[in-house]
Image (cartoon, rainbow, N blue to C red):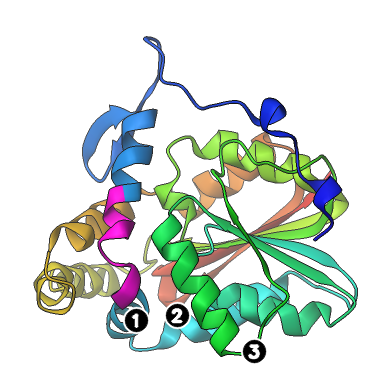
Amino acid sequence: MPRDCRKSQSDIGNLRPSMSEPKVFFGREEVSASEKTARVHTVFDSVASRYDVMNDFMSFGTHRVLKRLVVETASLRQGNSVLDAAAGTGDIARLLTRAVGPSGSVTCFDINNSMLREGRDRSIDAGCMDIDFVLADAQQLPFQDAVFDAVTIGFGLRNVADQPRALTEFRRVLRSGGRLVVLDFSKPTNSVLGFAFGTFMRTWPLVGNLVVGTPRPYEYLVESIETHPSQSVLALMLRDNGFNEVRYDNLLGGIAALHWGTAA
């Protein structure tokens, strides 16, 4: 990724809390946006090394298939430049390198340094040496305008305190006609499936306690899924924040949904 795509530190500024800061949900609890950002940081510090193990358990491995759909939906070409947001352990970023080829570039960022280190180490082990790892906040990206052909984010938008602000930032860094692809948990379309999934989710904190030594990250995960916008609401958010041709597909009966839109 060319370094002139980065903003200078003076341009980036800081996300400082203010007295008028709006309340957002951290799970079911209403907190300030800056407090949610800090709490999410702490949550992922505690799970970084075992993150993929728990993902495999919670999804029976299907998260890997869903993330491949993210890459396919991004409609990338050889030589494209793509940004993977809230990249976690870098599994989507590694798939993206194959899509853009040696002439393209993949940049990924995360707000959590532990997750970013985990992703960088795994990518090096997998032979993906050309991914650019950046410590950054989705609400205030350190990139110049219109420098990416696509932006992807898998299971990360729920964790952003100010989601409309992040969507606006994704739009800003996309070239005209570039595509945003969002994969996240959503609302099951069948009540029986919804009940079964809700029951299964309640086992996650128990398993998380055994695997990572604390249930709290997975209690938060369950609560964040329950308070995340529905498919239609998230589609409207994309339209309201500068995206055209917005579509979504329900996956696994609506347990997850894949949204995409084109930068105007």
Looking at numbered disc 1 in the image, what kind of residue is underneath it? Answer: Ser
Q: Which residues are magenta?
A: 42-50
Local SS, label 2: helix
Question: Would you say residue 85 is visible in this rendering?
Answer: yes
Tell me the kind of residue under disc 2: His
Mark 3 is surrounded, within 10 Å at the Cα level, by few (under 14), some (14 to 19) or many (20 or more) other residues, namely: few
Residue at the limit of the structure toward the top, as seen here = 19
The residue located at (62%, 42%) in the rendering is 167
* Position of residue 157 in the picture relative to residue 95 (left or right): left
Residue visible at 20% across and 69% down in the picture: 201
Query: Which residue type does callout 3 highlight?
Result: Gly
User: Badge 3 is on which residue?
Assistant: 127
Disc ID at residue 14: none
Secondary structure beneath disc 3?
loop
Q: CA distance from mark 1 to mark 2?
A: 6 Å
Q: Main secondary structure of the magenta part?
A: helix
Instruction: Write down the residue under mark 2.
Output: 63
Instruction: Check contact, mark 3 vs mark 2: CB within 8 A.
Output: no
Q: Please, is residue 229 above or below residue 120 in the view? A: above
Q: Magenta stretch: residue 196 in it?
A: no
Residue 43 among those drawn in magenta? yes
Q: Position of residue 100 (x, y in %)?
A: 82, 77
Q: CA–CA distance between discs 3 and 2?
A: 22 Å
